[in-house]
Amino acid sequence: MSGPLELWAGPECTVNRVGDQFHDQTVLSGFHQRLDDLDRLAALGVRRIRFPLLWERTAPDDPQHCDWRWADERLQRLRALGVRPVLGLLHHGSGPRYTDLTDAQFPAKLARYAAAAAARYPDADAWTPVNEPLTTARFSGLYGHWYPHGRGDRAFVRTLLNQVLGTVEAMAAIREVNPQAQLVQTEDLGFVTPATPALAYQADFENLRRWLGLDLLTGRVTPQHPMWDYLRSAGATADELLRLADRPCPPDIVGINSYVTSERFLDDRLALYPEHLWGGNGRHRYVDVETARVQGAHLGGFRTRLCEACERYGLPVAITEAHLGATREEQLRWLWQAWRAAEGLREEGRDVRAVTVWAAFGTFDWDSLVTRMQGHYEPGLWDVSASPPRPTALAHLAARLARGEAPDTPVADAPGWWQRELRILYPCHGELEALAVCGQPILITGATGTLGCAFARLCEQRGLAYHLLSRAEMDVADAESVEAALARWRPWAVVNTAGYVRLDEAEDDPRCWRENVDGPAVLARACARHGVRLLGFSSDQVFDGTKAAPYLESDAPAPLNAYGRSKLAAEEAMLSAAPDALVVRTAAFFGPWDRYNFVTLALDALRRGETVTAAEDQVVSPTYVPDLVNASLDLLIDRERGIWHLAQREAVSWAQLARLAARAAGLDPALIRGVHGSTLGLRAARPAYAALASERAQLMPRLEDALARYVREAQAEPARPARSLPQATEAVAA
């Protein structure tokens, strides 16, 4: 082992097949189109890239016709950048249409493609012919999720053996061209824990099975191997197993793909779980859930998986995937913990080569194991909902790690959700081990408001230290009060949700200017002096409604009312005093935790059989409060600045919003009466069209999705007394 721990990276590049549909992650993320993504990765200090030279993409229809143009251009660019590739040939795929994982000729066909690839790129020194062969065999041959949709031990064993045999033959073909070529073999090594002794046999079996791919490659599967009889009973021949044992192809680097969800817990105490989780193996009924959600003891995590592999094989190891589909600070914590584990083991003398930031440009639809194309996106080092891709805080952290520097974000050192008490979703098994939230806090103003309470609630869930402040604890318009609060709590950021929101009364109430303009200005100046990040909120009311399309951040404001003028003045004051401030324009709140919002009260009225009257001629972009808060916190952690528009993507009238909400809740929208806004007796002028969209990035989900989640969340909240319906054009931002 020589040199420092390396930073590697890779774009999520799965090309899996479901039925006759091929799903290509590089197309979904845009990596397929953007050559300059390689420059982005190189600029972080990435030493190697797991590069998708995928069989399905290069020779999709005819094995004799390989189109190398895409790879040629990119591998030439990598050479110029000084970044070395690890060439992957199959990534959770079943191969092109002319083969599949059960095809007896699959290994030979893969080897022929590998030979052609090696001839094309003879200087490539590291290869992964098949990514995660055992995991792919489980999803394709055991569970039936992916093509060829096998379900059972025989299909599992055949798909696994074909991938392992294909790896051996592919590496032999590659080494005919480059005898020094290295095999970087990746696998997910998630551990299985039983709740009771009755399930120990099943956990033992799964914990042996997780090594099978690597054991076969390293020649360990002989008649003495504990899985020999299982393999033989499921269709493996003695000849093919002994051939692998006699001609081992051990990896040069064992790559561990590490995910918190891969650690599984088997529990036969069914009464502790909802019925939809009940399953079994034909011998026992049990549930199979994430270990972190039920086991009191902490997960072994990166260190344990690395040590296991080192001790079992005595080979160099690397973390070849480290990704978490979560909020930004949890992604930071996952990467930082991976890096610290690798560095710690290197100090103990273990040969740990690299940590790979996976899903450099995010992943699509892995929440359904890529079985449904619903557009569910999880950002990575970059967020591709922006064009060009927007670097996240994860990219900033990765660059620091590559330079040998510690994180400079205050949220990375706190415990991840998998280490905190809230991880437990079912009755805890064993004594609970939990770490407390720690670190510099966020100060949140507006303790009595919808938005302030929502920020506090979600900071609690996300493990972000915070203080929710009343006016008595910090009056944002009083410079001395602000200085005292900053000195007392020493925050890294302030989220200002305090403000005057009565749009009609704002026309002649001087408190509007004090709360909405003087306060943010005072706060911005203080934050700038102390180097504290500031997040403030503005409104769609800064626009006059004459545009025929949703307003973008660069559109010129022209407010029609006093409230809108105060919000525009606040934007200018904040960005003038603190140029790195983040200012979010939003509109038309609805959410599950505060009953006093238009959607909630409209649905309450419909349930009572009352008519709901709402403006049909005033168009807004409704905003689901949990989505707004989560997106705002992500942007704050990403160190974004300037004006951002955050609202759900659709433009609807208030009456249309009520109808959509009624349908989502299973109510009859016939009682909703759309009227002209002028009949509602409102004092302040409103823009007829105030829909918002973003030219910076599309971070907010669809309205239909938000309403569905709202209905579920609202049903889980305790009932509260009914209140009168607010005017359907009320100001709701901050």
Image: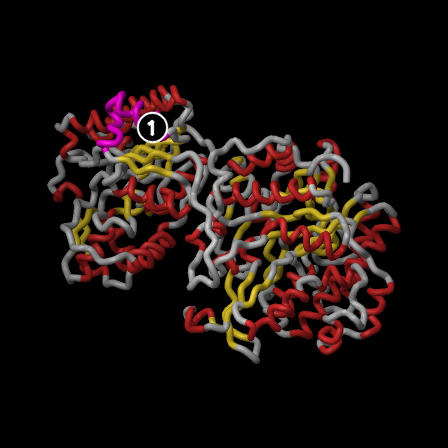
Task: For residue 388, say whether it is visible.
Answer: yes
- Report the amino acid beneath label 1: Arg
Q: How many numbered marks are there?
A: 1
Q: Is residue 479 magenta?
A: yes
The quarter of the displayed image where residue 96 is located: bottom right
Q: Which residue is mark 1?
A: 488
Image: 170 above or below 414: below
Q: Residue furthest bottom?
A: 283
Give the image location of residue 455, x and y in percent: 34, 42
Q: What residue is rendered at 53% in x and 64% in y? A: 265
Give the image location of residue 252, x and y in percent: 78, 49
Q: What residue is rendered at 49% in x and 51% in y? A: 418
The magenta span reads: 471-489
Give the image location of residue 490, x and y in percent: 38, 28
Identify the colour scheme used.
secondary structure
Image: 170 above or below 8: below
Badge 1: how crowded within 10 Å, few (<14), some, or many (20+)? Answer: few
Q: What residue is rendered at 59% in x and 69% in y? A: 143
Point out the image quarter for the N terminus: top right
Taking depth in this image into account, of 206 and 638 the one nearest to the observer is 206
Q: Is residue 243 magenta?
A: no
Taking depth in this image into account, of 430 and 223 the one nearest to the observer is 430
Judged left or right of residue 415, residue 478 is left
Task: For residue 32, say whether it is visible.
Answer: no
Judged left or right of residue 695, residue 681 is left
Q: What residue is rendered at 72% in x and 52% in y? A: 310
Give the image location of residue 24, x and y in percent: 60, 53
The quarter of the displayed image where residue 611 is located: bottom left
Q: Residue furthest front?
A: 431
